Image (tube, rainbow, N blue to C red):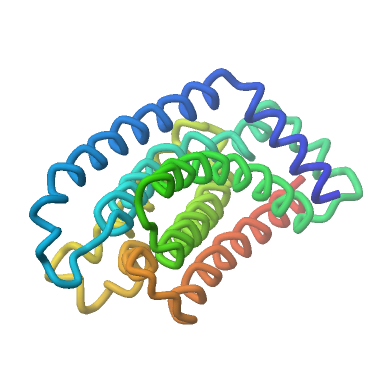
Amino acid sequence: MILTIAAREWRSLFLSPLAWTVLAAQQGLMAWIFLLLVQDFQALQGRLAGVENAPGVTDLVAAPLFRIAAWSLLLITPLATMRLFSVERRARTLDLLLSAPVSAVDMVLGKYLGAVLFLWVGAGLAGLMPLSLALGATLDVGKLLAGLLGLGLLAAGFAAAGLYLSTLTVQPIAAAAATFALLLGLWVVDLQETTHRLFGYLSPLRHYDALLLGLVNSADLAYYLLFSALFLGLAIRRVDDLRLRD
């Protein structure tokens, strides 16, 4: 049942003109920034030639590209998740699903999987761009894979938060605004000196930057898994409450 719901959400997303527009805009932006980063790297090659342990193409092109891709997720995720439950609640089609012999876990995980797969498509396409540099440069495959892993985990966590907030309202725009505000707040908490020490660990930015450096450790992986599990658990509880009310 989870896969059936996920396939339904997947089709719904890719049949939407908004999804294609957002995906095309993201990839266009990523391609433009990628070309600028490659151009800057080529201009720096002469100066880097005499520097010991100089940063390579992975550090100067792939890592900044992945960082921009992470910022783009702040804009894309609210648009991809805002309709998951809010539209069905507004159209009253969720009542039919709640009355069916489908558990809240299946509903939440199915919709979550559909949204995550959509976000992973965008992340994967952005990750293919640095791979093209392997034709003329030496890539640090370990750092590249760690960056892709971080981008995938970031998308999974963001999707879980957006899905939960979508269960709280019947207005998709309100769900999108709340998701953006929450994710942006968590993102910048590590940038403020006053909140860095107290709440810095809660910021996805800190854990993502570690993965971009090629540092894969259990603490960062556990953070993203717990982040996703927390919001999925809240979403499941919310759907159960909606079923009891109806």
Q: Position of residue 209 (x, y in %)?
A: 32, 65
Most distant residue in the bottom direction: 218
- 204 sits left or right of 18 in the view: left
- 152 sits left or right of 14 in the view: left
The residue lying toward the viewer, choosing from 26 and 194, is 26
Q: Quadrant of the C terminus?
A: top right
Where residue 88 sits, quadrant-wise, is: top right
**Location of residue 166 with respect to 234 vertically, above or below:** above
Most distant residue in the top direction: 17
**Location of residue 122 with respect to 93 vertically, above or below:** below
Most distant residue in the right direction: 101
Q: Position of residue 10 (x, y in %)?
A: 69, 35
Q: Position of residue 122 (x, y in %)?
A: 51, 39
The residue lying toward the viewer, choosing from 240 and 71, is 71
Q: Position of residue 244 (x, y in %)?
A: 76, 54
- 100 sits left or right of 124 in the view: right
The residue that appears at 62% across and 39% down in the rendered structure is 84
**Location of residue 183 with respect to 122 vertically, above or below:** below
The residue lying toward the viewer, choosing from 132 and 217, is 132
The residue that appears at 35% across and 63% down in the rendered structure is 212
The residue that appears at 59% across and 61% down in the rendered structure is 234
The residue lying toward the viewer, choosing from 29 and 219, is 29
